Amino acid sequence: MTSPPCALPPRARLPLHRRVLPLTAVAIALPLAKLPPRYLRAVLEVLRVGARPGTAAQASAARAAVVAVSLHCAVHNCLQRSIAAAVLCRFRGVWPTWQTGVRTTPFAAHAWIEADGQVIDEPYPDGYYRPLLTVAPRPPKRAAR
């Protein structure tokens, strides 16, 4: 059976010196994407510690860099793409909101990142998928009195 033809999304070409971190994030995301959901969530919750909340521009740049270096992430693998984008954000000291969710008619699952309350560079509108797992930035600790 063959797959239906699909058009590739537009991808930027990064200079060689800017490919190292995105490629590292993609490599880290591959084994993480194979973990059971509870372990994946636990790992991502550890990774977010100490990071500031990311902005939409930072999250979009991270997602674009991941898509630029990995055809696999650009086309079919939303889970690895979203994990890699979150890890790349973390390399830069920030954390977006990472989510996975489903829709029911017809059934489909998806993973994505959000920042500043908006879905980052996805073709689906807000609310299209119902979130099941969320790893948001940690709120800043309050100063002791």
Image (cartoon, helix red, strand yellow):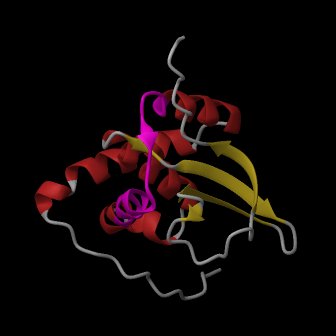
Image point (48%, 57%), residue name: 81
Image point (30%, 63%), residue name: 69
Q: As drawn, is 29 to the left or to the right of 23?
A: right
Image point (32%, 62%), residue name: 65
Question: Residue 86, percent across and down?
Answer: 46, 48
Q: Nearer the viewer, residue 7 or 97?
A: 97
Q: Nearer the viewer, residue 49 or 75?
A: 49
Q: Which span is picked out in magenta?
A: 47-64
Question: Residue 42, percent across and down?
Answer: 61, 29
The C terminus lies in which quarter of the figure?
Answer: top right
Residue extending farthest to the right is 105
Image point (56%, 31%), residue name: 45
Question: Residue 22, percent across and down?
Answer: 30, 53
Question: Residue 143, percent across and down?
Answer: 50, 18
Q: Is residue 133 above or below residue 111?
A: above
Q: Is residue 44 above or below residue 22?
A: above
The N terminus lies in which quarter of the figure?
Answer: bottom right
Q: As drawn, is 69 to the left or to the right of 130?
A: left
Q: Quadrant of residue 114?
A: bottom right
Q: Quadrant of residue 76?
A: bottom right
